[in-house]
Image (spheres, rainbow, N blue to C red):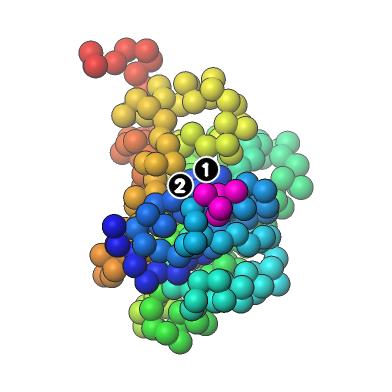
Amino acid sequence: MSRLAGKRAIITGGAQGQGAAIARHFVREGAKVIIADVADDAGKLLADELGDAAFFSHLDVADPASWAEVVKDAEVSLGGTVNVLVNNAGVLRFGEIDTMLESDLDLLINVNMKGTFFGMAAVAPAMKANRQGSIINCSSVEGLAGMSSLTGYAGTKFAIRGMTKSAAIELGAHNVRVNSVHPGMIDTPMTQAQGGEAAMQWGSTRIPLERVGTPEDIAPLYVYLASDESGYTTGGEFAVDGGVTASHTFYPGNSGKNSGR
């Protein structure tokens, strides 16, 4: 498998969940990857599992200085400048408008929004100079439509969507592509922490495909967007959501009644 031969990628939030699945798929397809995360132990274990093509670097996505260090280290570890960035790191916090803690809002902005911006800023100079690159930003279905109690989270995910489109315009002349991925409800440690299996079961009743997604459902799209197969694709937004965004907010779910499957 060599769809990503010659690709050198940084994957943020790469130690677990969607990020780990993306890292596994990238290595399987011939890429070299930096697994960048604050979860040192999990990140190092995954890098060891994936072998010589994977390396771990500690990264605080909200800190530009941390980004500079990781990009510099990546050039040495990967044997060249980074030509793929996956801005996957993110946090989820529920909270109603009049009760949400300012500290939670700050965390959402710092990790989701600023982390994505700082990542693009860190890799853009080399990508522009080399006239090649693919930046893939993880937004959400909440970056396409709103949801109650997720005003703060949705605000950051809409911001990622907007930044993606603006960056695609800005960097297009340098042959650098920027796209956003919008996952629906995916069974990861982050979503499990917000409600566990009960939330997963409820979510499956609100999805046209009648199941919650997995990281393995998401990763192949990242392979495509990182590869040269998507060479004419930039400024795009790609929903991977089991059909959630195909309906409006009054979609009733299956209410325990499926179609006989």
From the viewer's perspective, is 147 left or right of 67?
left
Q: Quadrant of the C terminus?
A: top left
Residue at 40% in and 69% down: 7
Nearer to us in this view, 114 or 32: 32
Q: Is residue 48 magenta?
A: yes
User: In the rendered image of this protein, does residue 231 appear above or below residue 44?
Assistant: below
- Number of numbered labels in the structure image: 2
Q: Position of residue 43 (x, y in %)?
A: 61, 51
**Do the CB atoms of the residues marked 1 and 2 lie less than 8 Å apart?**
yes
Instruction: Please name the residue that numbered disc 1 is placed on.
Output: 17
User: At 37% from the left edge and 54% from the top edge, which residue is drawn?
Assistant: 28
Can residue 14 be found in the magenta stretch?
A: no
- In this rendering, would 232 be left or right of 36? left
Tell me if residue 111 comes above or below residue 150 in the rendering: below
Amino acid beneath label 1: Gly
Q: Main secondary structure of the magenta part?
A: helix
Q: Is residue 92 visible?
A: yes
Q: Nearer the viewer, residue 257 or 6?
A: 6
Residue of label 2? 21
Residue 224: which quarter of the image? bottom left
> CA–CA distance between discs 1 and 2?
7 Å
Task: Name the disc covering residue 191, or none.
Answer: none
115 on left or right of 236: right
> Residue 253: x percent and y percent?
37, 22
- The front one of 87 and 36 is 36
* Label 1 element class: helix
Magenta-highlighted residues: 45-49
Neighbour tally class for label 1: few under 14, some 14-19, many 20 plus, Cα within 10 Å: some
Q: Residue at x 73, y 36 (%)?
A: 99
Q: Position of residue 32 (x, y in %)?
A: 45, 65
Decide: few, some or many residues near mark 2? Use Cα within 10 Å; few <14, some 14-19, many ≥20.
Answer: some
